[in-house]
Amino acid sequence: MKARIIPTIPETVLSYNISGENLALLEKAVSASGMKHAVIPAEKAGETIGFLAGYKGFSSNGTNISADEECVIFSGISSKRLDVLLKNMRNAGLDIPLKAVVTAYNQSMSLEGLLTELKKEHKALEKVKK
């Protein structure tokens, strides 16, 4: 019987437009959780999520645009480990409203497109809370 090696996706937290104290708090929470942190450059909002997360089969599309929103994207993190990370972020006082997990659906979207979707979802949730 041959062993089958299934490549794993490294646990990575991608951040976009986060700076100053929030960036320091995020880096601390990610590091405490034993995960990798990568900062997405401001002009890369036109790139696909799959490319930004380093997934095989995705390459740069060369689109250089920026967006204004802050966002955190979680890649390769199990739900149990994500719960721990989110708790660490809350305990640190870190509030970043726009968060996403890389999925089969969104990995082909541009970061700009994902941000648009997240803003719609966030507004809908705010209405429900009221």
Image: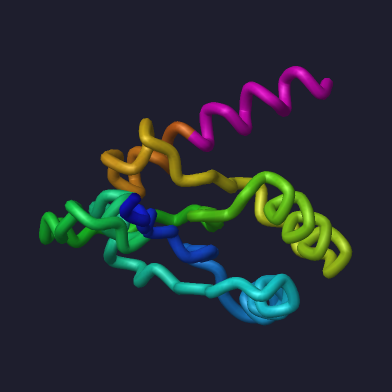
Image position of 102 (left or right of 54):
right
Q: Quadrant of the C terminus?
A: top right
Image position of 22 (left or right of 8):
right
Magenta stretch encompasses residue 117 = no
| Residue 32 quadrant | bottom right
Q: Residue at x 44, y 56 (%)?
A: 68
Helix, strand or loop: magenta stretch: helix
Q: Residue at x 62, y 49 (%)?
A: 78
Whether residue 15 is visible to the viewer of this picture, yes or no, is no
Image position of 80 (left or right of 46):
right
Residue in the foreground of this view, choosing between 23 and 83: 83
* Residue at the limit of the structure toward the left, as seen here: 62
Whether residue 121 is visible to the viewer of this picture, yes or no, is yes
Residue in the foreground of this view, choosing between 27 and 19: 27
Q: How is the image coloured?
A: rainbow
Residue range in magenta is 118-130
Image position of 39 (left or right of 44):
right
Residue in the foreground of this view, choosing between 91 and 74: 74
User: How far across and how far down the image is residue 54, in percent?
Assistant: 31, 63
User: How far across and how far down the image is residue 35, in percent?
Assistant: 60, 72
Q: Residue at x 53, y 74 (%)?
A: 37
Q: Residue at x 19, y 61 (%)?
A: 64
Residue in the foreground of this view, choosing between 31 and 71: 31
* Residue at the limit of the structure toward the right, as seen here: 91
Up-down relation of residue 48 to residue 62 (above or below): above
Up-down relation of residue 11 to residue 39 (above or below): above
| Residue 86 quadrant | bottom right
User: How far across and how far down the image is residue 95, in percent?
Assistant: 74, 57
User: How far across and how far down the image is residue 65, in percent?
Assistant: 24, 58
